[in-house]
Amino acid sequence: MKPTPIFSKIETGSKCYDDVKATYTGISIKTFISLALTMLVAIVVATFMILSINKAITENPEDTEIAMKWLTTSSVLAIVSVIIAFISALVGRLSDKAAKVCIFIYSISEGFVLGFITGIVEAVYPNQYIGALAVFGTLVIFTVMLLLFVTGVLRVGSFLRRFLAAVLITAVALGLFTILFILFSGLLSTYSTNIIWLILLIETLYLVYACFSLIYSFNEAQAVVESGCRKESEWSVALGLLITLAYIYLQLLRIIVLLLQIFGKRN
């Protein structure tokens, strides 16, 4: 099978046969290890954020002052982590040799970002288990898309490319329309229910795009294994899977929050 364009830089063919070849098991193990590291960092940071926010709203001035300093520092670290995650993901995807290091840098930095966001959400919506729901939803989506790929129901082809392009263009267009509507309608501080529904539609489209992007990741893994690529190529494939899974989790988190804004009450 010919490798997909994204993995055009991964060596295939006879040059790879002298080395240990990439396998599905190797890709799975590397994906699991990096995903576990991401989740561990996210859980620690989320717990820290929840405790800090709870202290920030207490009646004790000393606790509030300390908590606010920690929250400010965490916000700065979150911004830095976004930058590091982006750079490490880009370098790791372009170079399979650098992917082994980049995937762990990405796991830690992205874990911090996801934990930071999850902690804020859990503190604003206590006892809703939003993070757990998003994790469960991500696992369900991964399993379903993997089954669809393995059974041959979904394959990378011209139709899938056109479909994803249409979904992405629609989401971007609706996003720009929403921004312009909010700016010109004066709804800068509060959203009406209709606007929230529109934003929910946009986020759902992005989630659909991310879900079907898993098919590309599975196809890349298949291409790397069947083409006899070197063992180190497994890290690049695992990084691609990790990036997609992290994005799906983030989209689910945002969708759940929007649904709570529509149907529930914030505590």
Image (cartoon, helix red, strand yellow):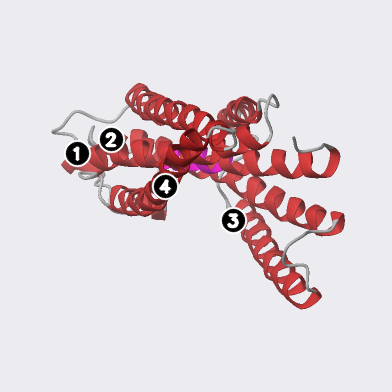
**Residue that lies at the very extreme toward the left in this rendered image:** 18
Disc 3, SS: helix
- Asked if the residue at tag 3 contacts the one at tag 2, i.e. Cβ–Cβ closer than 8 Å, the answer is no
Question: Which percent across, then down, holds residue 31?
Answer: 39, 29
Question: Which percent across, then down, holds residue 177?
Answer: 73, 71
Front residue of 187 and 229: 187
Give the alpha-carbon distance from disc 2 to disc 3, as whole Å. 26 Å
Inspect the image, locate mark 3, and give the three-letter code of the amino acid beneath it: Arg
- Asked if the residue at tag 2 contacts the one at tag 1, i.e. Cβ–Cβ closer than 8 Å, the answer is yes
Inspect the image, locate mark 4, and give the three-letter code of the amino acid beneath it: Ala
Is residue 240 shown above or below 55?
Answer: below
The boundaries of the magenta stretch are 240-248
Is residue 244 shown above or below 146?
Answer: below
Quickly name the residue at label 4.
Answer: 78
Give the alpha-carbon distance from disc 4 to disc 3, as whole Å. 33 Å
Front residue of 172 and 178: 178
The quarter of the image holding the N terminus is top left
First in sequence: mark 2 or mark 4?
4
Is residue 185 shown above or below 165?
Answer: below
Inspect the image, locate mark 1, and give the three-letter code of the amino acid beneath it: Cys
Give the alpha-carbon distance from disc 2 to disc 4, as whole Å. 39 Å
Quickly name the residue at label 1.
Answer: 16
Residue sitting at x 66%, y 55%? 163
Within 10 Å of disc 3 (Cα), the crowding (few <14, some 14-19, many 20+) is some
Disc 1, SS: helix
Quickly name the residue at label 3.
Answer: 161
Residue sitting at x 60%, y 30%? 131
